[in-house]
Amino acid sequence: MKSIVSIAGNIERIRERIEAAARRAGRDPAEIRLMAVSKFHDLSAVKEAYRAGIRLFGENRVQEARGKFADFKRDASDVDLHLIGSLQRNKAKSAVELFSCVQSVDRDELVVELARRAEEAGRILPVFLELHTGEESKAGFDGFDSLCRAAELVFASSSLSLRGLMTMAPYTDDPSPIRASFRSLRSAGEELEKRYPEMEPLILSMGMTNDFELAIEEGSQLVRIGTALFGSRPGAAQ
Ligand SMILES: *Cc1c(COP(=O)(O)O)cnc(C)c1O
C-alpha cells in the first residue's frame, strides 16, 4: 500500500509537469484538469488522493467503481466520477446511477441506451464521444462521419449533453504517432464546433501517464493519469 506522502507527492510532481508542459505550449495551466484513474487501486488509495486535493476520478468498470465509490461519494459529495472504459449496454442503467459523466461513448447504440436510462433517472448526463485515433484496440468511433452522426444523436436527446471528445494514443516511445493521434482528436473537435456553432465548446480528454505532456502540447484540457499517481497496477492487464 502507498503512503499518504507518496500519493500526495506523486500528485504534486504531476501538477508540476502539467504546468511545465502548459508553459512550453504557451497555455494557461489552469485550463487543464487532472483526473486520477483509480482502476485496480483500492478505496484507501482513492481517499489519499482525495485528501491531497483530487476531485476528478476515472474508473473503467462499473462494478469495480461501484464497490469503491458508492459509499464514498455519499461522504465526499464533491467527487466527480467519470467512466472511461468500454460500457456494455446492459450496464448503462448502473452507469447512469453511479457516474457523473461517461467519457467512453463509442457507438450509436450506447448513445441511445444512455439517453433512455438518463431520461428514466430524470437527469441530464454529460457525455464525451470517444474517437479511435490510432490506439491498438478498436475502441471509439472510427472517423469524423460516424462521430458527427453520434453527436447528432446526442443533440437530439434531451437527457444527454455533449461535453467533449476522448481518445487514447498508441502505446509507444515514438512521439510522432502519439502526436498524430492527439492532433486528429483536436481537429475533429474543431470540425464539430464549426459544423455546430451553437454547441458548448468541447473539452479534449487526452493524455495518460506515458504521454500526457505531449497531449498538453497538442491541446488537451483533461489528462487521465493512473500509474504515475498510484503506482503500477499489479496483475492487471490494462
Ligand atoms: C487506464 C486508463 C488511463 C490511465 O492510464 P495510465 O497509463 O495508468 O496513466 C487513462 N485512460 C483510460 C481510458 C484508461 O483506460
Image (spheres, rainbow, N blue to C red):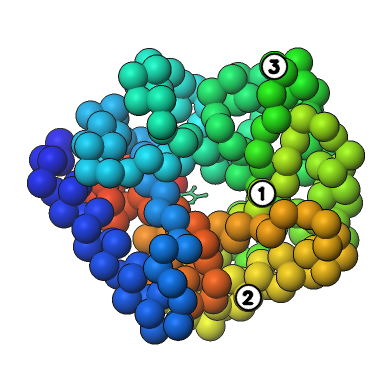
Badge count: 3
Task: Indicate left or right for 49 with 1 as reference.
Answer: right
Name the image quarter holding the N terminus.
Answer: top left
* Quarter-of-image position of residue 108: top right
Coordinates of residue 175 in the picture (x, y in percent): 47, 80
Q: Amino acid under label 3? A: Ala
Tell which tag, 3 or 2, sits nearer the viewer: 3
Q: Earlier in the sequence, mark 3 or mark 2?
A: 3
Residue at left 46%, top 36%? 80
Coordinates of residue 136 in the picture (x, y in percent): 59, 60
Residue at left 52%, top 62%? 221
Q: Which residue is mark 2?
A: 183
* Quarter-of-image position of residue 72: top left
Coordinates of residue 156 in the picture (x, y in percent): 89, 39
Mark 2 and mark 1 in contact (Cβ < 8 Å)?
no
Task: Indicate left or right for 57 with 151 as reference.
Answer: left
Q: Which residue is mark 3?
A: 121
Q: Which mark is residue 163?
A: 1
